[in-house]
Image (cartoon, helix red, strand yellow):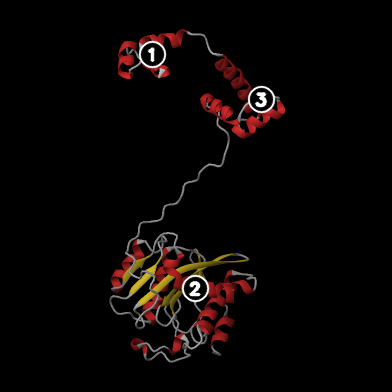
Amino acid sequence: MIPLVQELAADHIPVAVTCRVLNLPRSTYYEAIGREPSTRSVADQELTMSIVAVHQDSRGTYGAPRVHAELRLGLGIRCGRKRVARLMRAAGLPGVCHQHRYRHRPQPATHEDLVKRDFTATGPNRVWFTDITQHRAADGWVYCCAVVDAYSRRVVGWSIADHIRSQLVVDALEMARWQRPPSPGTVVHADRGSQYTSWVFGRRLRQAGLLGSMGRVASSVDNALIESFWSTMHRELFDRQPWSSKVELASAIFEWIEGWYNPRRRHQPGQPVPTRVRNPSHDHAHRGMITTPTLSGKPGQAPAVLTDGGGVARAQNDAHERLGTV
């Protein structure tokens, strides 16, 4: 309390008033400021000078552990590390450490969690799950957004691009609506990514009468159904070979979804393939028939998947040729 009384006295606050408030006898205060420095204080002052010298020699980078090591091993001064740390704090000598970067705070949830980790549905187009994945080709990243039906596990909508803007998820949702016109009240479950909390995505949900649903932050379990789908895609497609270009990778994604996963792959023993699950709203979509629209809205063609500025790079024609044999 003695330093506090001294600071207040320097601000022209009477010592008697301060001592009375702090319940400190004035005689104790005057005795403390009048006595000679103790042996410990003198030793601390001398050690502080050595600490300052070591800190300056380290270009201001050493913290208490390294300063302590230099004092003991380099200068032969016996002292404790905590004492060095105390004196460095008193002298205002910080060491250099990793700066805490700004931690990104996710956008607040725009929808409640309507799924509650229940990944089943009583029929088609009752619950959709959507998410984004990415994979690197030799000339850059390729991003894929998918919409999976919880009942049939069919990919009802997808989009591929070399960007991760909100338009990526909007295109996938529009494709799902084109292929499987949902009835009002269909739940669309996603994570809290900025693409799904964007105004344009929420507006498309409202226009279609769909119910948005969002899981918790940093919890992949809340979206486990589509996370399982991404795991399958990475295991069966992405990780099996290197990809020389974004167009090659995008063509392979298109072929894998529409040529294998949707029409032919049996997800679990004893379950029908997704295209054999009857969809009352689309009885005209025959089994094995590719009716996938491109981003330009034309069905049955290899999609215009990659955008770069104002240009459009089409998927390779061999992907469409392979699909024609399915």
Residue 300: numbered disc: none
Q: Is residue 165 above or below residue 90?
A: below
Can you tell which quarter of the image residue 274 is in?
A: bottom left
Tell me the element at label 2.
helix
Residue 228: numbered disc: 2
Q: Position of residue 91 (x, y in %)?
A: 53, 24
Give how far apart the Cα atoms at labels 2 and 3 are: 60 Å
Q: Is residue 39 above or below residue 109?
A: above
Tell me if mark 3 has few (under 14), some (14-19) or many (20+) residues whose alpha carbon lies within 10 angstroms of its own.
few
At x 47%, y 63%, the residue is 164
Quarter of the image with the C terminus is bottom right
Write down the residue under mark 3.
Answer: 78
Write down the residue under mark 1.
Answer: 10
Instruction: Identify the amino acid type marked 2.
Output: Ser
Q: Position of residue 93 (x, y in %)?
A: 55, 28
Q: Is residue 29 above or below residue 141?
A: above
